[in-house]
Image: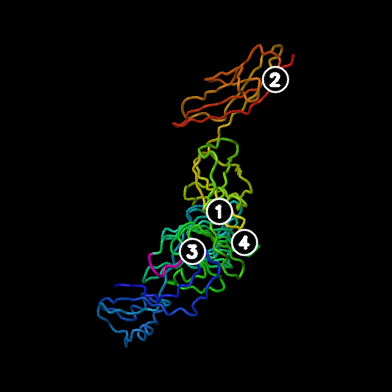
């Protein structure tokens, strides 16, 4: 048996990545057919039963191919099967990562908590709450990630029995989804994200779609490949329609904003990615802190002056499939609380004044809380001062070493006391003359082959006459 898609070519009339005015679509697409080559003993009834949505459609095959009856046929006879009557079988999506509040519902049933490992299909609805994330894996290896406060319905999730082509349609009602779609291998493969204002169709790409119901606007941003964008009200797509037939064809590193019931906005270059200051820094404080460096003015895809905000996301994996934090900040500083020790990845991107999120950059970082508490007090009846300190964790092997520094100036540039390789948590400094003193303690550890260092704040005390 041989099956081959034979879709009649559509008229290509999409606007280019830099254009802004969509051309008129073809009034009606010609009928589409799939070629089937018979096996010995096939009948029209058997072919219709196996590959068409209704076994009674053998009469359609009879008329279309001028075969008078459902008799047995010889091998090698080429038949035409109507593409719009091909049988489709359901597929499932697997939840491979969840974090924070995430729920599912089927049809009109109430929402229930959604957990990693769950299986979803057509009719399932998914929603995330504040700081909630869900990533779905489809049968072809594609991934769809929902960020916080999003709502997504699985409209179609199936494949054609005869050709194996996938038909996947997801409806975004609120929030943001990021999709990395495996490259389509069949002409009738279809993957679409639908919002109330646009349909974004792809044949293998990495892209984001966000819908803001308050202003009824949909944002589409293409990181890799190409995306066909059409107004939701005007699009009646069918499998096999090329992306070039879309009202707008967005290329990689471009995005557009579409208002309610309007044509897709102009294709705009996405901002370059910012960079991370101190990318090798171990996050050892009470909070996890990132300082950003904006994209330079005059960059090929945007300028720093066009930046309105930044998005900073933390994930357990480099591909950002297992998201656990998402923060939008207006400045160049982002801070996260309650992050356990471990290895993570941070992704940063600039958000333009037009609402488009730019190209991302990903860094790995280590979260290893390493706190140092220190105190000082005078000894009664003397000019001696006693300093004490301790760390909140011990290395897996070896010991912690300390360095104590004291000086007469806040910069500690000319130390009066500089004691290294201390192993205890106490030091007494004797016979100090009256004056103002500044001091700090530095803790050092070797753990699992890596060097870690932290220090207390520079503190001061006054010794009166």
Q: Is residue 325 visible?
A: no
Sequence-wise, the earlier of marks 4 and 2 is 4
Sequence-wise, the earlier of marks 1 and 3 is 3
Give the residue at mark 3.
Answer: 227
Q: Give the image location of residue 197, x and y in percent.
A: 58, 68
Q: Quadrant of residue 52?
A: bottom left
Residue at the far bottom: name it: 68
Give the residue at mark 1.
Answer: 302
- Of badges 1 and 4, nearer the viewer stands 1
Local secondary structure at mark 1: loop
Mark 1 and mark 3 in contact? Answer it, CB < 8 Å. Answer: no
Q: Tell me if mark 4 has few (under 14), some (14-19) or many (20+) residues whose alpha carbon lies within 10 angstroms of its own.
A: some
Mark 3 and mark 4 in contact? Answer it, CB < 8 Å. Answer: no
Spatial CA distance of label 1 from label 3 is: 20 Å
Q: Give the image location of residue 409, x and y in percent.
A: 65, 22
Sequence-wise, the earlier of marks 2 and 3 is 3
Local secondary structure at mark 4: strand
Main secondary structure along the magenta-highlighted residues: loop
Relative to 87, does residue 113 appear above or below in the rendering? above
Q: Nearer the viewer, residue 441 or 99?
A: 441
Image quarter of the C terminus:
top right
Q: Residue at x 57, y 60 (%)?
A: 210
Local secondary structure at mark 2: strand
Mark 4 and mark 2 in contact? Answer it, CB < 8 Å. Answer: no
Sequence-wise, the earlier of marks 3 and 4 is 4
Q: Tell me if mark 3 has few (under 14), some (14-19) or many (20+) residues whose alpha carbon lies within 10 angstroms of its own.
A: many
Q: Tell me if mark 1 has few (under 14), some (14-19) or many (20+) residues whose alpha carbon lies within 10 angstroms of its own.
A: many
Give yes or no for residue 100 being in the magenta stretch.
no
Give the residue at mark 2.
Answer: 436
Extent of the magenta region: 185-192
Mark 1 and mark 4 in contact? Answer it, CB < 8 Å. Answer: no
- Of badges 3 and 4, nearer the viewer stands 3
């Amino acid at each position: 048996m041989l099956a081959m898609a034979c879709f009649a070519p559509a008229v290509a009339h999409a606007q280019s990545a830099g254009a802004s005015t969509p051309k008129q679509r073809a009034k009606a697409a010609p009928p589409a057919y799939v070629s089937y080559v018979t096996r010995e003993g096939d009948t029209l009834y058997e072919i219709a039963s196996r590959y068409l949505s209704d076994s009674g459609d053998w009469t359609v095959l009879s008329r279309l191919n001028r075969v008078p009856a459902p008799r047995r046929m010889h091998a090698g006879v080429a038949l035409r099967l109507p593409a719009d009557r091909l049988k489709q079988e359901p597929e499932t999506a697997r939840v491979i990562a969840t974090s924070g509040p995430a729920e599912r519902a089927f049809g009109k049933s109430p929402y229930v908590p959604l957990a990693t490992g769950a299986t979803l299909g057509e009719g399932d609805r998914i929603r995330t709450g504040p700081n909630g994330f869900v990533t779905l894996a489809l049968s072809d290896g594609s991934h769809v990630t929902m960020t916080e406060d999003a709502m997504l319905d699985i409209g179609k999730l199936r494949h054609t029995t005869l050709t194996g082509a996938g038909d996947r349609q997801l409806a975004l009602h609120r929030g943001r989804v990021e999709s990395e779609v495996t490259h389509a291998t069949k002409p009738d493969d279809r993957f679409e994200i639908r919002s109330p204002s646009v349909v974004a169709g792809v044949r293998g790409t990495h892209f984001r779609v966000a819908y803001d119901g308050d202003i009824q606007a949909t944002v589409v941003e293409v990181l890799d490949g190409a995306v066909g964008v059409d107004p939701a009200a005007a699009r009646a797509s069918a499998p096999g329609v090329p992306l070039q037939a879309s009202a707008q064809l967005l290329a990689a590193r471009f995005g557009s904003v579409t208002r309610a019931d309007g044509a897709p906005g102009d294709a705009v270059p996405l901002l370059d990615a910012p960079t991370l200051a101190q990318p090798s820094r171990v996050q050892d404080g009470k909070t996890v802190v990132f300082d950003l460096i904006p994209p330079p003015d005059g960059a090929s895809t945007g300028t720093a002056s066009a930046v309105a905000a930044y998005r900073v996301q933390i994930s357990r994996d480099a591909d950002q499939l297992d998201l656990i934090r998402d923060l939008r900040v207006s400045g160049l500083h982002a801070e996260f609380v309650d992050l356990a020790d471990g290895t993570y990845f941070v992704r940063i991107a600039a958000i333009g004044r037009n609402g488009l999120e730019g190209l991302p950059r990903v860094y790995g970082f280590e979260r290893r809380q390493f706190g140092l508490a220190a105190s000082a007090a005078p000894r009664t009846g003397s000019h001696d001062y006693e300093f004490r300190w301790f760390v909140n964790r011990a290395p897996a092997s070896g010991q912690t070493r300390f360095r104590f520094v004291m000086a007469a100036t806040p910069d500690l540039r000319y130390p009066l006391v500089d004691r290294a390789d201390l192993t205890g948590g106490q030091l007494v400094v004797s016979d100090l003359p009256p004056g103002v003193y500044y001091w700090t303690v530095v803790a050092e550890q070797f753990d699992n082959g890596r060097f870690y260092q932290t220090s207390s704040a520079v503190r001061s005390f006054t010794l009166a006459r």
